[in-house]
Image (cartoon, helix red, strand yellow):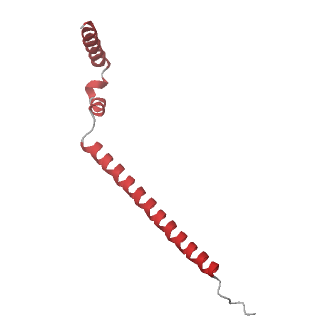
């Protein structure tokens, strides 16, 4: 009896594994694309933050905010405003 008898299960298994490897490569490609998009988005955010720094970052960088006397005065003004708003 010859060994090479037609075996449909063998072909089904081959098709199955080919489909599986194709699916795996598609998933890997999608993961790489998602990672690339995340990197691009992070780079755009970093660039935007360099171009338009937030008010807090600007205040922290300015020498005026470093002076403790000025900082205390600003805090007093903020407390006055908060008390005034609390009365209303």
Q: 81 or 12, which lies in front?
A: 12
Front residue of 72/43: it is 43
Q: Quadrant of the N terminus?
A: bottom right
- Image quarter of residue 55: top left
Residue sitting at x 40%, y 60% = 33
Residue that appears at 62% across and 81% down: 8
Where, by quadrant of the figure, is residue 7 drawn? bottom right
Q: Position of residue 3 (x, y in %)?
A: 72, 90
Q: Position of residue 57 (x, y in %)?
A: 30, 33
Left or right: residue 83 compared with residue 22 = left
User: Relative to residue 79, is residue 14 depicted above or below?
Assistant: below
Residue 33 relative to residue 24: left or right = left
Residue 31 position in % (x across, y down): 45, 59
Looking at the image, the residue that sits furthest to the right is: 1
Left or right, 5 with reference to 33: right
Give the residue at x 26% y 30%. 62
Q: Nearer the viewer, residue 12 or 65?
A: 12
Placement of the C terminus among the 4 image quadrants: top left
63 left or right, relative to 36:
left
The residue at the point 48 percent across, 63 percent down is 27
Residue 39, image quadrant: bottom left
Residue 53 in percent (x, y) is at: 27, 38
Above or below, comparing residue 32 to residue 51 in the picture: below
Say if 18 sits above or below 27 in the image: below
């Amino acid at each position: 009896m010859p060994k090479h008898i037609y075996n449909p299960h063998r072909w089904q298994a081959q098709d199955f594994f080919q489909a599986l490897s194709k699916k795996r490569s598609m998933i890997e490609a999608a993961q790489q694309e998602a990672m690339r998009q995340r990197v691009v988005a992070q780079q755009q955010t970093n660039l935007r933050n360099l171009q338009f720094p937030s008010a807090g970052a600007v205040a922290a960088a300015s020498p005026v905010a470093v002076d403790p006397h000025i900082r205390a005065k600003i805090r007093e003004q903020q407390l006055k405003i908060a008390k005034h708003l609390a009365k209303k």
